[in-house]
Image (spheres, grey):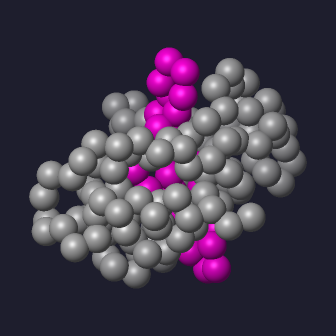
């Protein structure tokens, strides 16, 4: 299933803006989590949203090819994560969803709100830095669809 919400948001609100330019504050639904992820993380909320300000921050800070891959694959990263980890304090976000796309791992931090969840940041885990996630607590894996014991 192709979901290009982030691409459409970029084209409508971000494309052509200069660095640090203020953009309109809009919130869009990126995906509804799978039942397996909801059950595995014991969540009551299932919707994950992206804010235009977060998208603008990614646009300003990421290399062009990384940003393009993120917006074209954001739905896959969040809807079909390979692994979900507990985020470390004091980092922003409650969960870290990771997904391998081609030969690159992507990391998406998601924060729980009262009735929905929000994408806080997304980035690729650079080659040679795969150990970055090593000390995070694994909460759920698509491979076995059960929390680790």
Is residue 120 located in the magenta-colored stretch of the structure? yes
For the point 63% across and 62% down, the residue is 3
Residue 34 occupies quadrant: top right
Expressed as whole percent of the image width and height from the top left, the position of residue 91 reads 36, 37
The magenta-colored residue range is 97-122
Expressed as whole percent of the image width and height from the top left, the position of residue 113 reads 47, 24
Report the quarter where the N terminus lies.
Answer: bottom right
Is residue 100 located in the magenta-colored stretch of the structure? yes
Position of 41 with respect to 71 (left or right) is: right
For the point 60% across and 58% down, the residue is 75
Q: How many marks do you count on the picture?
A: 0
For the point 72% across and 24% down, the residue is 42
Q: Nearer the viewer, residue 94 or 2?
A: 2
Expressed as whole percent of the image width and height from the top left, the position of residue 118 reads 47, 38
Query: Magenta: predominant secondary structure element?
Result: strand
Expressed as whole percent of the image width and height from the top left, the position of residue 129 reads 46, 67
For the point 28% across and 42% down, the residue is 25
Position of 57 with respect to 21 (left or right) is: right
Q: Is residue 119 visible?
A: no
């Amino acid at each position: 299933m192709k979901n290009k919400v982030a691409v459409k948001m970029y084209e409508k609100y971000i494309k052509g803006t200069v660095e640090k330019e203020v953009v309109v504050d809009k919130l869009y639904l990126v995906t509804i989590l799978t039942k397996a992820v909801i059950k595995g993380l014991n969540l009551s909320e299932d919707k994950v949203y992206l804010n235009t300000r977060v998208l603008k921050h990614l646009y300003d800070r990421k290399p062009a090819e990384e940003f393009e891959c993120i917006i074209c694959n954001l739905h896959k990263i969040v809807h079909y994560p390979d692994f979900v980890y507990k985020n470390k304090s004091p980092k922003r976000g409650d969960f870290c969803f990771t997904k391998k796309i081609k030969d690159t791992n992507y990391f998406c931090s998601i924060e729980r709100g009262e009735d929905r969840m929000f994408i806080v940041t997304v980035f690729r885990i650079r080659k040679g830095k795969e150990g970055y996630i090593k000390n995070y607590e694994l909460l759920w894996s698509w491979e076995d669809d059960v929390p680790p014991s």
